Amino acid sequence: MNKYLILQNPGHNRVYYNFAGQLAVSELEIASKQLDISCENIEIIEIENIRYISISCKEELTTSALDILSRLSFIFAIYKLEKINDKDYLIPISKNKYEYIDSKISSLLKYSGKTNELFTKMMVNIALHSSNFNFNDKIHLLDPVSGKGTTLFEGAVYGFDVTGIEIDSKATQEASLFFKKFLETERYKHSTNTRQIYGKTKSEAIYIQEFEYAINKTDFKSDVLRKKFSVVSGNSQDASKYFKKQNFHIIVGDLPYGIAHGNLADKKFASITRNPSELLNLCLPEWYKVLKPGGVVVVAWNSFVVSKRKLEEIFNANNFSVFTNSPYNNFEHFVDKSIKRDIIVAKK
């Protein structure tokens, strides 16, 4: 049996890190089901007061398995535990390079209420590993409550095509300007375009800001290698009016927690609510239409505001199948005294 130890990323804040061990174990348990080798005994261990996530595998890590492990949100370093002359040694293993663009992009833009980018990355991983798709597919990700774009940036790091819907036009403008500046600073070959995608009158008009980009001019000419990043200043409950049916592989969103800001659920009445159940009741029918069969929705919310059971009922009523067994029920954790965050994972 081969035993591997994963050192957690120390970049979490102190409060989050106290809960990050269990989150890491749960993420690894979900990801391990996609490995091409047999693994077991995923657990937290300590060596000389340093915390590791341990996983035992019948075979040595393959290139494919290492590719999946290298993308885990919490990973900082991977070691193989070897016994030499009756002593235990940690042998470092190089992680696979997978980033299409520099992962620093998610941490550059600072603003109040921003979700930890490592948590966002975890949600993206869980969505993909719980779906019928994988990293070899040309993934198109939708964040239906995209804010200033953290989920979109994490998807772009993976080389996914990404699209966001955000009702706050100032937020979409800031995300677009930031991404444009990033592409220019990092010297990616790119083009931009703004076009109307919905509305017969000026007052109804909905616009999408689109970027196409690639590492170099040669890749930019390829439909396969050229990537897409787009944001829509619109309402998520109109998603099927903006996009074709079965357009997205995964949907990942961090619902407003009702602390720094509320949910602008119904643009017509401009109602602001602390309760994410209203937003989901309005939007899930539309998300279902634009999600591919076998696709997965992952959303985070403040469980102080509404129970997980209530949200599960809403997802089930909209024809989604909710993952309710372990490890999917092990993601609840405190952010601060007013926010207890959890995620729900549901498949079409």
Image (spheres, rainbow, N blue to C red):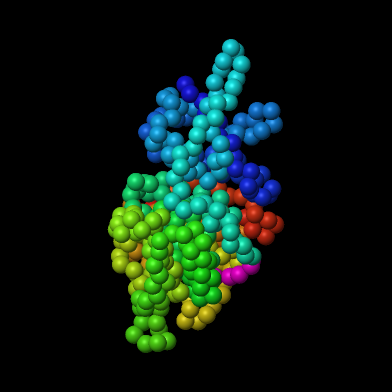
The number of discs equals 0
Above or below, 312 against 14 in this view is below
Above or below, 41 against 180 in this view is above
Residue under the point 46% across and 59% down: 187
User: Is residue 296 located in the magenta-colored stretch of the structure?
Assistant: no
- Using residue 324 as the reference point, say whether residue 90 is left or right of it: right
In this orientation, does residue 280 appear?
A: no
Residue under the point 44% across and 68% down: 231
Residue under the point 54% across and 34% down: 78
Of the pair 313 and 71, the residue shown nearer to us: 71
User: Is residue 261 located in the magenta-colored stretch of the structure?
Assistant: yes
- Using residue 223 as the reference point, say whether residue 285 is left or right of it: right
In this orientation, does residue 120 appear?
A: yes
Residue under the point 52% across and 80% down: 270
Quadrant the C terminus occupies:
bottom left
Q: Which residues are magenta?
A: 259-264
Of the pair 19 and 230, the residue shown nearer to us: 230
Is the magenta region chiefly helix, strand or loop? Answer: loop
Above or below, 345 against 112 in this view is above
Measured as percent of width and height from the top left, residue 23 is found at 56, 44
User: Residue 38 falls in which quadrant of the image?
Assistant: top left
Measured as percent of width and height from the top left, residue 25 is found at 54, 39
- Using residue 156 as the reference point, say whether residue 8 is left or right of it: right
Residue lying farthest top?
85
Measured as percent of width and height from the top left, residue 50 is found at 66, 33
Measured as percent of width and height from the top left, residue 13 is found at 67, 50
